[in-house]
Image (tube, rainbow, N blue to C red):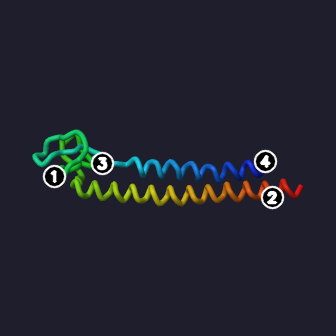
Amino acid sequence: MRSRIVLLVLFALPLLWGAVDLLRAAATTGSRCPGVQTDADGESEPGPMRPGHSCALSYDAGTGRSVGTSTYEQVRYAQEVRRGDLAVRGTVLTVYGAAGVAVVTVAARKRAASD
């Protein structure tokens, strides 16, 4: 009985983690700059990125310069790759967890029926 509960928990954790990853992949919308976003003139710009904007990924407050920048297209591509990674990982974990829970449940029922 105790081993069945342990196995169910061990398979339920990846199932829940996969569901969270799938929700994160579905909720990722728009292009957000993870650093300081600037427009074409170099002025700080709040809100979602638009074509022509750039993103200062690492900002040195001492010198006021960007250490690394990305264009709108680069940020958009990185977010699409991240969304795809989350979707694949979420799918694999969800299928693995659901299959494990199903196998443990069916095995427990067959064992209970034979006893």
Q: Nearer the viewer, residue 35 or 50?
A: 50
Query: What residue do we see at 42% from left, 50% from top?
Result: 26
What element does badge 1 sit on?
loop
Residue located 42% across and 52% down the image? 25
Please indicate whether residue 10 sits to the left or right of residue 41 in the image: right
Instruction: State which mark lies toward you, 4 or 2.
Output: 2
Cα distance between the residues tagged 3 and 1: 15 Å
In primary-sequence order, the first of circles 1 and 2 is 1
The nearer-to-camera label among 1 and 2 is: 2
Marks 3, 2: nearer the viewer:
2
- In the picture of the structure, the residue carrying the numbered disc 3 is 30
Question: Which of the two discs, 3 and 4, labels the residue nearer the N terminus?
Answer: 4
Residue bearing mark 1: 52
Q: Mark 1 touching mark 2, by CB under 8 A?
A: no
* Disc 3 from disc 4: Cα separation: 46 Å
Kind of residue at badge 4: Arg
Of all residues, the one furthest to the right in this rendering is 115
Report the residue marked by disc 4.
2
**Left or right of 106 on screen, residue 50:** left
Question: Which mark's residue is nearer the viewer, 3 or 4?
Answer: 3
Disc 4 and disc 2: Cα gap in Å?
Answer: 17 Å
Residue that badge 2 annotates: 110
Query: Residue farthest to the front?
Result: 113
The residue lying at 55 percent from left, 57 percent from top is 93
User: Residue 39 location in percent, x, y?
Assistant: 15, 46
Q: Secondary structure at mark 4?
A: helix
Q: Quadrant of residue 103?
A: bottom right
Asked if the residues shown at circle 3 and circle 1 are in contact, with their CB atoms under 8 angstroms apart, the answer is no
* Percent x, y of residue 95: 58, 59
What secondary structure is marked by label 3? loop
The mark that comes first in sequence, 4 or 1, is 4
